[in-house]
């Protein structure tokens, strides 16, 4: 809908107004329609809870790889649209895809994410959490290679863009359920909120690093910009090593890692 609005009117500012209204609706739903069910479990100090969480080496190991994943996720919304607009050859439309094409591509990404979410969760139920995240890492690497091909292939740019966003949708839906579940598994019941708060900081760090990194890459010469996606793809090797270490730590601590 955003792409159609821009294509018909060019009114970019109206998108921000509409988005603001949608968040006001969300606020109203959260404030009036959701009932608070929190119950305190035992007595504990918030500061002591954070100290306990930050001494958990399994959680800290996971946080490192989770920052990588959140940095990957932010590239979809912050960097890929710029790359598709400014660096993908499109002879029929000048330089890059037009706004309607880009909005259609991201609609495809969203639809693929929604359709695959439940089947992916069921499939991942067969694996331990770290192994499910390893699968996600491989999909992220494959998706970034496809984004690179979108910009450098001699032809078929739209095909590679569709393939890239489809693979990245699979990478996202294999990451999200495992990422939340592994934090719940690691946390003592009385500190679950603190552990999830630490996990949220990974998202904050990733959303800080990701746009800076992507923006820097988009300002470089074409060769560096195209190679940026290969760099992200190769970085999954770091994620795989850390996830293997996390798997070993979890096994040593005899935590249940199977099933949702």
Image (spheres, helix red, strand yellow):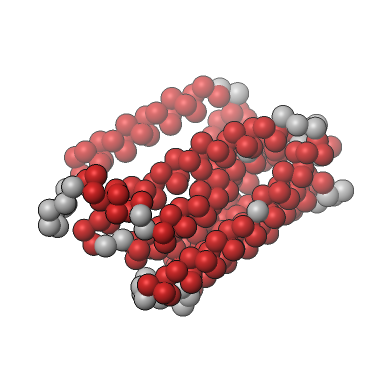
- What residue do we see at 43% from left, 31% from top? 19
Residue 185: x, y in percent? 34, 65
Q: How many marks?
A: 0
Residue 22: x, y in percent? 37, 34
- What residue do we see at 58% from left, 48% from top? 72
In the figure, is residue 26 to the left or right of 222?
left
Residue 167: x, y in percent? 62, 58
Q: Quadrant of the C terminus?
A: bottom left
- What residue do we see at 77% from left, 42% from top? 226
Most foreground residue, 157 or 136: 136
- What residue do we see at 37% from left, 58% from top? 56
Q: Is residue 62 visible?
A: yes
- Residue 202, compared with residue 241, is above or below; it is above
Most foreground residue, 12 or 198: 198
In the figure, is residue 135 to the left or right of 28?
right
Query: Residue lying furthest right in this view?
Result: 154
Residue 80: x, y in percent? 65, 41
Q: Is residue 161 visible?
A: no
Most foreground residue, 247 or 145: 247
- Residue 55, compared with residue 205, is above or below; it is below
């Amino acid at each position: 809908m955003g792409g159609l609005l821009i294509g018909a009117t060019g009114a970019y500012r109206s998108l921000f107004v509409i988005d603001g209204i949608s968040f006001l609706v969300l606020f109203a739903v959260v404030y009036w329609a959701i009932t608070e069910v929190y119950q305190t479990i035992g007595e504990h100090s918030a500061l002591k809870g954070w100290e306990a969480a930050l001494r958990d080496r399994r959680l800290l190991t996971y946080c490192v790889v989770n920052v990588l994943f959140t940095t990957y996720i932010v590239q979809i919304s912050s960097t890929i649209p710029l790359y598709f607009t400014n660096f993908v050859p499109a002879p029929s439309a000048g330089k890059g895809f037009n706004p309607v094409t880009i909005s259609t591509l991201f609609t495809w990404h969203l639809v693929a994410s929604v359709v695959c979410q439940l089947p992916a969760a069921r499939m991942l139920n067969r694996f331990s959490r770290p192994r499910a995240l390893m699968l996600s890492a491989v999909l992220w690497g494959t998706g970034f290679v496809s984004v690179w091909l979108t910009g450098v292939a001699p032809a078929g740019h739209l095909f590679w863009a569709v393939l890239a966003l489809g693979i990245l949708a699979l990478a996202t839906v294999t990451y999200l359920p495992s990422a939340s579940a592994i934090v719940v598994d690691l946390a003592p019941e009385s500190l679950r909120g603190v552990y999830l708060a630490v996990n949220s900081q990974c998202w904050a760090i990733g959303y800080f690093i990701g746009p800076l990194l992507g923006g820097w890459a988009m300002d470089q010469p074409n060769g560096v910009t195209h190679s940026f996606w290969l760099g992200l793809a190769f970085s999954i090797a770091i994620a795989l090593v850390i996830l293997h270490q996390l798997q070993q730590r979890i096994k040593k601590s005899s935590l249940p890692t199977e099933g949702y």
